[in-house]
């Protein structure tokens, strides 16, 4: 019998947008490749073998005398009864919780991210526990559950998870000031000047009634930047827009730090928190799908 090279460990990781710790399964001795079960890509550990299935990692060296038909049956049973254990995880902000002080306090981040955002993630996982939608990317999940304007029950939690992830990435320590490069050029092209853009963004935030978000988005059909307001959990992805920056205008986003001084919150976001680094990266990615340049007139 020809030995298979001894593999020290086998690692299984979940696909993109499904967060679960990688697991390591140790195998003391080689096993013929034909006997190894084939794991689906979406499988995450921990898991256990059904009692009727030989665990090749514990069985050690198996003899080729075992009938091939029995092996095939065992692998089929393994695939049939094994449950996929996966979940959408709570993504950390790209900075420490106190990194945005004094404009957004650690206490606010602990409540907003550690409690409210986590609550949306937990609720979404409960809703999707036995759903065929489990395993979709968050963007796919939002567009599917929006259901052409007739949202399914999972939509609100899915959209709020994505909206919060996007909001954290729309800020950075020592942010604000002026953008640069392509972002500034596009803003000046679509709004006339950066000052005009800033005034319109602040005005739009102050005019938002109730809870929601203010977004700088790229309108794919119009090929230009625009400022939009959304209420509650609505996300611009459902309209085909490409979000560039967002500002959370739910009361829990600012009340601990600013009480009812919403204007100060919005202006501090624009002057000290907004991440033009993130905006630049998003514009660059958007250009892969939208031609932002002037149309070229063919030369006769």
Image: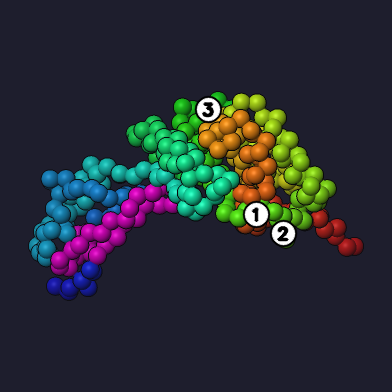
Q: Distance between the residues labelled 3 and 1?
A: 32 Å
Residue carrying label 1: 276
Q: Do the residues labelled 3 and 2 touch (CB within 8 Å)?
A: no
Q: Magenta residues?
A: 9-36
Residue carrying label 3: 151
Residue carrying label 2: 180
Q: Residues within 10 Å of mark 1 (few under 14, many from 20)?
A: many
Q: Residues within 10 Å of mark 2 (few under 14, many from 20)?
A: few
Left or right position of 209 against 47? right
Looking at the image, residue 66 lies above or below residue 237 = below
Q: Which of 255/192 is in front?
A: 255
Looking at the image, residue 53 lies above or below residue 297 = above
Q: How crowded is mark 3: few (under 14 residues within 10 Å), some or many (20 or more)?
A: some
User: Is residue 290 shown in magenta?
Assistant: no
Name the residue: 15% across, 54% down.
55
Q: Are marks 3 and 1 in contact (CB under 8 Å)?
A: no
């Amino acid at each position: 019998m020809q030995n298979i090279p001894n593999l020290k460990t086998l690692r299984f990781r979940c696909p993109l947008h499904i967060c679960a710790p990688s697991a390591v399964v140790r195998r003391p001795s080689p096993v013929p490749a034909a006997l190894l079960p084939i794991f689906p890509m979406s499988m995450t550990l921990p898991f256990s073998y059904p009692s009727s299935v030989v665990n090749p990692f514990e069985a050690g060296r198996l003899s080729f005398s075992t009938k091939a038909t029995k092996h095939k049956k065992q692998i089929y049973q393994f695939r049939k009864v094994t449950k996929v254990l996966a979940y959408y995880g709570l993504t950390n902000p790209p900075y420490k919780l106190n990194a945005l002080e004094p404009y957004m306090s650690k206490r606010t981040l602990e409540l907003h991210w550690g409690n409210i955002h986590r609550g949306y993630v937990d609720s979404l996982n409960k809703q999707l526990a036995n759903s065929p939608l489990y395993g979709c990317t968050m963007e796919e999940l939002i567009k599917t559950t929006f259901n052409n304007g007739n949202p399914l029950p999972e939509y609100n939690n899915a959209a709020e998870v994505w909206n919060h992830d996007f909001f954290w990435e729309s800020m950075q320590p020592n942010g604000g000031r002026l953008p640069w490069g392509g972002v500034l050029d596009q803003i000046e092209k679509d709004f006339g000047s950066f000052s005009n853009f800033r005034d319109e963004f602040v005005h739009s935030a102050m005019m938002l009634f109730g809870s929601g978000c203010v977004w700088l988005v790229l309108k794919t059909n119009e090929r230009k930047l625009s400022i939009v307001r959304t209420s509650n959990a609505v996300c611009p992805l459902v309209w085909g827009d490409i979000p560039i920056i967002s500002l959370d205008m739910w009361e829990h986003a600012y009340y601990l730090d600013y009480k009812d001084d919403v204007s100060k919150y919005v202006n501090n976001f624009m002057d000290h928190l907004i991440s033009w680094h993130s905006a630049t990266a998003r514009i660059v990615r958007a250009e892969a799908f939208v031609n932002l340049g002037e149309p070229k007139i063919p030369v006769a």
